[in-house]
């Protein structure tokens, strides 16, 4: 197969900005596609596959080509994709034949090289997960499927399947998750359908969190770290839009996006965005029947979806995040009524961000653990998540 020079250079440039400037891969791709509207579906797919797989397999590709230069890593990835390396592509490293021959030697390399992860994350995974780390890491290196959540305020799952089929999109039900659909491998949802409001892109693991909150019609629910509100909208749907969901965040841009999404989803009468300020916990003291703290975390459960994250994350950052998690569980439960339900969630698979944080809260008294729900990538094929549901002891 032959490739176009402009596309090859674009892929290499994006990969370089991700590795050298620690740019976010998704954002860089979106910007490049916006700036080059003439690129067709196949062009965009070639660029996306190149940069995602180079980010996913950076160290393994580096071993194959004996170089850390982005141009060389791209060349190694193209060999894996079945392309011939064009004569005009200059890089320091091995030839296509040498790259293919070296694949056999990859199995004998240390796990951090073989599975392409920074040494410190590999050591952390072993320390926290022991023997389970191998399987979880392998699962996190698989390509992510696109999962959808059917918005039951606007449609039903069978009707959504039929509606998508009208656009030649095959979506199948996900067992055990009543509102979830999964697209065929490699398939995406066009932007026009993403903006329709009948379905939301939401990983299946993420769809396990709102049901654990168990919101009831007529209640007041606070989603205390809502971001753009995927879980807020799920909570509203479970409540049949009867009651109030306060989507709170420190980022006003994300809250503006939540407002737009709530309108599309027919949830705008139920979902209200609130920017978090110094007085928020006092203003909302004992207001919530249910409180969701979807805490900032390492995001290590989402590596299949954002493989560039493992190269951006640093140990000091992880320490800071653990501090934030503890602080949120110190302050935010003040917004929950006595007898109310608290759900703490992360998209991390590390016990130090999950059960250890809950144990600290339990040790202080005032809460009873009801249920824990870890979502294992290796067991489910979903992103990695953790959630614990607790009851605030009556006063």
Image (cartoon, rainbow, N blue to C red):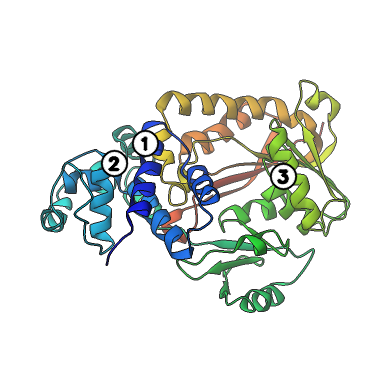
On screen, residue 183 versus residue 292, left or right, reads: left
Say whether disc 3 or disc 2 marks the residue closer to the N-terminus: 2
Q: CA distance from mark 3 to mark 1?
A: 29 Å
Q: Which residue is mark 1?
A: 19
Q: Is residue 178 visible?
A: yes
Say whether disc 1 or disc 2 marks the residue closer to the N-terminus: 1
The quarter in which the N terminus is drawn is bottom left
Q: Is residue 319 above or below residue 83?
A: above
Q: Nearer the viewer, mark 3 or mark 2?
A: 2
Closer to the camera in the image, 329 or 161: 161
Q: Nearer the viewer, mark 1 or mark 2?
A: 2
Residue occupying the point 23% across, 43% down: 113
On screen, residue 196 versus residue 144, left or right, reads: right
How packed mark 3 is, by other alpha carbons closer than 10 Å (few <14, some 14-19, many 20 or more), is some
Closer to the camera in the image, 207 or 306: 306
Mark 3: which secondary structure? helix
Mark 2: which secondary structure? helix
How far from the left and from the top, in percent, is residue 79? Answer: 23, 58
Say which mark, if any, is on residue 257: 3
Say whether disc 3 or disc 1 marks the residue closer to the N-terminus: 1
On screen, residue 66 versus residue 342, left or right, reads: left
Mark 1: which secondary structure? helix
Q: Is residue 90 above or below residue 86?
A: above
Residue occupying the point 66% across, 66% down: 179
Q: Is residue 44 above or below residue 346?
A: below
Q: Which residue is mark 2?
A: 70
How far from the left and from the top, in percent, is residue 308? Answer: 41, 42
Residue occupying the point 20% across, 43% down: 91
Q: Is residue 132 visible?
A: no
């Amino acid at each position: 197969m032959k490739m176009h020079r402009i596309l090859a250079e674009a892929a290499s440039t994006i990969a370089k900005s991700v590795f050298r400037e620690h740019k976010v891969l998704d954002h860089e791709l979106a910007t490049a596609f916006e700036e080059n509207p003439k690129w067709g579906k196949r062009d965009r797919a070639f660029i996306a596959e190149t940069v995602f797989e180079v980010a996913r397999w950076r160290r393994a590709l580096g071993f194959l080509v004996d170089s850390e230069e982005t141009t060389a890593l791209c060349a190694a990835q193209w060999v894996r994709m079945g392309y011939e390396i064009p004569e005009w592509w200059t890089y320091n490293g091995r030839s296509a034949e040498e790259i293919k021959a070296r694949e056999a030697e990859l199995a004998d390399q240390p796990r951090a090289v073989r599975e392409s992860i920074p040494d410190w994350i590999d050591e952390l995974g072993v320390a926290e997960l022991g023997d389970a780390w191998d399987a979880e890491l392998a699962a996190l290196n698989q390509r992510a499927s696109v999962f959808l959540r059917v918005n039951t305020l606007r449609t039903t799952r069978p009707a959504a399947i039929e509606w998508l089929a009208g656009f030649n999109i095959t979506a199948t039900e996900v067992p055990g998750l009543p509102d979830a659909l999964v697209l065929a491998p490699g398939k995406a949802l066009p932007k026009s359908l993403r903006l329709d409001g009948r379905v939301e892109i939401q990983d299946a693991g993420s769809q396990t969190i709102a049901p654990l909150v168990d919101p009831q019609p007529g209640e007041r629910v606070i989603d205390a770290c809502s971001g753009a509100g995927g879980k807020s909208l799920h909570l509203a749907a479970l409540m049949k839009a009867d009651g109030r969901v306060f989507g709170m965040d420190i980022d006003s841009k994300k809250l503006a996006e939540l407002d737009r999404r709530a309108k599309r989803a027919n949830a705008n009468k139920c979902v209200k965005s609130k920017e978090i300020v110094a007085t928020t916990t006092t203003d909302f003291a004992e207001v919530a029947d249910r409180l969701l703290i979807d805490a900032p975390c390492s995001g290590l459960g989402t590596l299949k979806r954002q493989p560039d994250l493992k190269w951006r994350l640093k140990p000091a950052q992880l320490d800071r995040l653990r501090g934030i998690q503890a602080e949120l569980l110190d302050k935010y439960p003040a917004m929950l009524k006595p007898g109310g339900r608290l759900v703490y969630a992360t998209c991390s698979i590390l016990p130090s961000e999950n059960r250890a944080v809950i144990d600290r809260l339990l040790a202080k008294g005032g809460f009873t653990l009801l249920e824990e729900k870890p979502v294992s990538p290796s067991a489910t094929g979903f992103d990695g998540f953790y959630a614990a549901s607790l009851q605030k002891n009556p006063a």
